[in-house]
Image (spheres, rainbow, N blue to C red):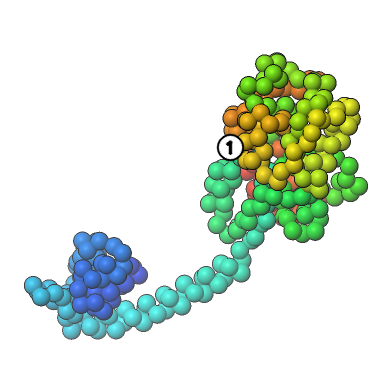
Amino acid sequence: MSGRRTDLNITQLQYVLAVADHGSISKAAEALFVSQPAISLQIKKLESELGFSLLYRTAQGVSLTPAGEEFCDGARLVQQSWAQLQEINARLSQQNREHLRIYLGPRVFSNGLFPKIMAFFERYPHIEPTFIQSSENFLEDLKNGDLDLALNYLSSSETCPDLHRFFRCELIREPQCVLTSHGSPLSKQAHASFEDLRGCAIIAAPQDFMEAQVLKRTLQKHGVVPGRTYRLDGVETSMDMVRNGTGIILGPKSFAEYYGVCAVPLWPPFEESLSFVCLQENKNHVGLKALRKYLLEIC
């Protein structure tokens, strides 16, 4: 005659052992941060499957039956083995975890991509991202191995002697605009030319930052001499200054709604792209390739 088949699970064993250790279902529930009915239900279900009682239940509390004591002796061995298995799993998971250091430019946030990027990493828990939001020159950081990926614009006007070393994949193209306060004279115009920018106060990144160098070359190309330049390492503070009418910024249209400013398209028009940028030799890296495919699908 074959024995009774029982579908034990580790949660049931943990519940029984907690009750045995605390001598009380309510105290076991407190220790495990679960409800008392949940423990009672699972133990009764287990007893039904086993075909014998594990607990004596009295008005004074609970205690183990002889069968329950023998069952708990075996359950403790299983609990110890389960803990060892969990430790092994955690160690192997950490060893096989893939780490990605990702620079996030402001356009990631203004285009609403950050929550979607987080959703990607929820689907791939073995990839552990580190997000970086400040970089003087993300291309140099990529070359030096301080970054694995940058999600930012890569202007065609940038002078980088070894630009060929980088792989670039355009995600979102946006018209460049003059970002200004809603009360400024520029905000009333349908378009703004570079001629309109002469003498304006410009808000820019610190001089050593790549964005500042690109802006400087752009203004020089069009013969624009700003009235003065405010330099800040922080998009939020810079946009506060734009809202207050302190100065203007050249940036994408998506900044307007996100930061609560006015975007006046530049004329003649030109566009910049939020791009996926990494070293050429890393473009087929498993994690980067999966993220690139995902971003192209959602963009």
Q: Is residue 5 above or below residue 143?
A: below
Question: Does dot 1 land on a helix, a strand or a loop?
Answer: loop
Rendered location of residue 64, percent (x, y): 18, 80
User: How far across and how far down the image is residue 47, in percent?
Assistant: 20, 70
Residue at 52% across, 74% down: 88
Q: In the picture, which quadrant includes the N terminus? A: bottom left
Q: Report the side of 52 relative to 116 (left or right).
A: left
The answer to which of 31 and 18 lies nearer the viewer is 31
**Residue 292 shows in the view:** no
Relative placement, left or right, of 73 versus 280 is left
Q: Please state which of residues 55 and 119 is positioned toward the viewer in this rendering.
A: 119
The kind of residue on which mark 1 rests is Gly
Q: Residue at x 54, y 47 (%)?
A: 119
Q: How many marks?
A: 1
Q: Could you say which is closer to the camera, residue 178 or residue 166?
A: 178
In the picture of the structure, the residue carrying the numbered disc 1 is 112
Q: How would you rate the neighbour count of disc 1 (Cα within 10 Å): few for under 14, some for 14-19, many for 20 or more?
A: few
Image quarter (top left, top right, bottom left or bottom right) of the C terminus = top right
Can residue 180 be seen here? The reply is yes
